[in-house]
Amino acid sequence: MITAEVTISGEVFSADIEKAIIQAVDETIALAHKDFKDTIKTFSARSQFDFEVKRAVRRGDTIEGGVGTDNLNYTRLNNGVPAHQVGKGGKYMSFRPVYTPKTSRGVISSRSGGTSGRRQRAKGPWTHPGFPAGQFDMAIRNKRIKDLGDKVNKAIALSTK
């Protein structure tokens, strides 16, 4: 879950400024939501899932909102998977030997990819090589943190005119 937070530092803000900051947080969360969806846009229909969007609310001196997912496949893609044993001894696995990733580490996009090559069979167990963390949440956070600051500053400037 990526959260966007603005701390008001105990200062007294007008209702107009508070409303403008809430809108700025919601707009930033909407952009982050789009970024998350961009990382899975080429995934198959059965691999698609929803992201949870938490609209901005004020809690004490903080206005916060967020977007993210607890989908296991996305978590693995984002956090990576270490090498591990798969399959049982004596069983056969059918697979294609060439794999082209649909995503790149830290890049907010998705492209065509998947397996290719002539089907092969092998007797298990097998060592899956794992794959590195995509770190999409960090890439999205780093991309949108400046947007949040710009939107909040603009909101305050417009509300105090």
Image (cartoon, helix red, strand yellow):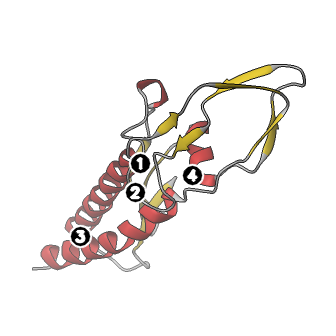
Kindly identify which residue carries mark 3: 17
Query: Tag on residue 159?
Result: none
Q: Considering only order in the chain, which callout, 3 or 1, is on the residue closer to the N terminus?
A: 3
Question: Secondary structure under badge 4?
Answer: helix
Query: Mark 3 packing: few (<14 Cα in 10 Å), some, or many (20+)?
Result: some
Q: Which mark is residue 78?
A: 4
Q: Earlier in the sequence, mark 4 or mark 1?
A: 1
Residue displayed at 78% across by 20% down: 92
Kindly identify which residue carries mark 1.
Answer: 39
Residue farthest along the left direction in this orientation: 161
Q: Position of residue 104 (x, y in %)?
A: 48, 56
Checking the image for residue 108, the label placed there is 2
Q: Is residue 137 left or right of residue 150?
A: right
Q: Nearer the viewer, mark 1 or mark 3?
A: 1
Residue 75 lies, with reference to residue 24, above or below; the image says above
Q: Amino acid at mark 2?
A: Ile
Residue 89, quarter of the rendered image? top right
Q: Position of residue 149 (x, y in %)?
A: 32, 75
